[in-house]
Amino acid sequence: MTEDAILVEGLSKRFYRYHGARPWTFQELFLRGASWYRKRYEFWALRDISFRLAPGRTAGVIGRNGAGKSTLLRLVGGVGKADRGRIEIRGRIGALIDLGAGFHPDLSGRENVFINGVISGLTHKEVAKNFDSIVAFAELEEFIDSPLRIYSTGMQMRLAFAIAVHIQPAILLIDEILAVGDYAFQNKCLERIAQFKAQGCTILLVSHNTNLVSRFCDEVLWLEAGELKAHGEAEQVVGQYLAEMGARTRARTPDVSGVQTTPTGVELRLNENRFGSLEVEIEAVNFYNTRGEPTRELESGEGVVIEIAYIAPQPIAAPIFGVTITRPDGLVCWDSSTQPDLLPTSRLQGKGKVILHLERLDLVEGQYYIDVGIYQHDWEYSYDYHWHVYPLKIHSHESQKGILSPPHRWEFKDKDY
């Protein structure tokens, strides 16, 4: 039986909050009495958290601000001591938590790379071996011998991230630091984390970006006020979280007394295959082939048009529309959204349509689902998300394995070429 990479049992962490009027000087303490100093209040950041994570699995941790996400990650990483419970870690840990915490502003970037690398667990020889790769990843070749104090905040974060991802850990802890640098560099960071995942690294990821969590994670822990509210398959837990967050902030109460049915005959049920606040609703999702004909079946390599009809009774500022193609087993084959290419700058109100044009859909033969969603402009929660509701059948004349079926041909040449 494979041992867990991370095992957490009954974990609890307590902090204290002191009275705002407590004395700050010895004179105040003497005049007002020592009892003022002892006036403190217990605050449990975590209460009885238990979970286990197998090697090679990726788990997301979601929840509102103050839910205890960062506290959990720090305790797992060995920063601080739990008041109750136990944590067992099997494997070398790499942490993307406080990027640049060990940097010194008066030292050069080169010197900070060596110091921070050794602090992170690398030997001097390992840092030297990876130095050029670290600098290239951070895109700081021209500034590496300049003092760190002239670096912008973004440059420092890029350098710190580059050091952290060269540690080659068995377990990687990530705490909401993926907004590093510009859009292109963020994609580079995500690609490197995807490489860690593909190599079998165990990852524990804290993020408010639920779309990112759904895409990267195998399972999700939802923390609420320091307690574990849900733990399970990523799509389901994220969907439940988005539904509850949307319900707390929605401007109106939707009519959910009856079960709605899509044109394909699938029933839409809240918190099962439909999630969100319903401030904006998806009224219909239609597929068309390149001839403009409605369809639910395509030949591999054929183009498709996905039309999402919506209604927004109240003004909604800059929502994001997303489309994900998945297999029945939940594997994400393709994912796209209107951010940052087509993010509406004005408020949406009334009825409208968003249309996605896919010039080719090069998938192997099989059954797929087109999942569609409308999200708040900062991805904090969904307005309406339909999961495994709209099936799409792909046909092919070739017998292939995998996911993609790109245009290809075989060519043979004899020895005289």
Image (cartoon, rainbow, N blue to C red):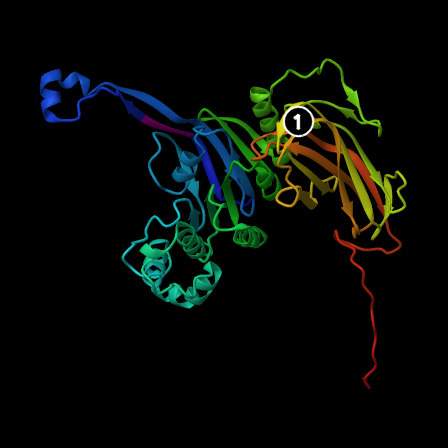
Which residue does the image show at 33% across and 36% down from the upper left?
Answer: 81
Where is 155 relative to 320, above or below? below
Disc 1 marks a residue whose amino acid type is Phe
Q: Is residue 396 magenta?
A: no
Position in image of residue 247 (x %, y %): 59, 20
The x, y position of residue 209, in whole percent, is 55, 38
Position of 111 relative to 158 (above/below): below
The region drawn magenta spans 11-15
Residue 158 position by quadrant: bottom left
Q: Residue furthest bottom?
A: 416
Query: Left or right: 313 with respect to 260?
Result: left
Residue at (45%, 34%) from the top-left corner?
Answer: 69
State whether residue 4 appears in this view: no
Q: Residue at x 59, y 24 (%)?
A: 246
- Front-lying residue, 381 or 273: 381
Dot 1 alpha-carbon crowd within 10 angstroms: few under 14, some 14 to 19, many 20 or more: many
Of 229 and 22, the residue lying toward us: 22
Indicate left or right for 74 with 216 as reference.
left
Query: In the figure, 375 relative to 165: above or below?
Result: above
Does the magenta stretch mainly form a helix, a strand or a loop? strand
Residue 265 located left or right of residue 80 = right
Where does residue 61 sit, x and y in percent of width and height? 51, 35
In the image, is residue 13 part of the stretch drawn in magenta? Answer: yes
Tell me the residue that label 1 is attached to. 275
Name the spot of residue 169 as percent of width and height, x first. Answer: 46, 53
Front residue of this view, candidates 376 and 7: 376
Secondary structure found at label 1 = strand
- How many numbered circles are shown? 1
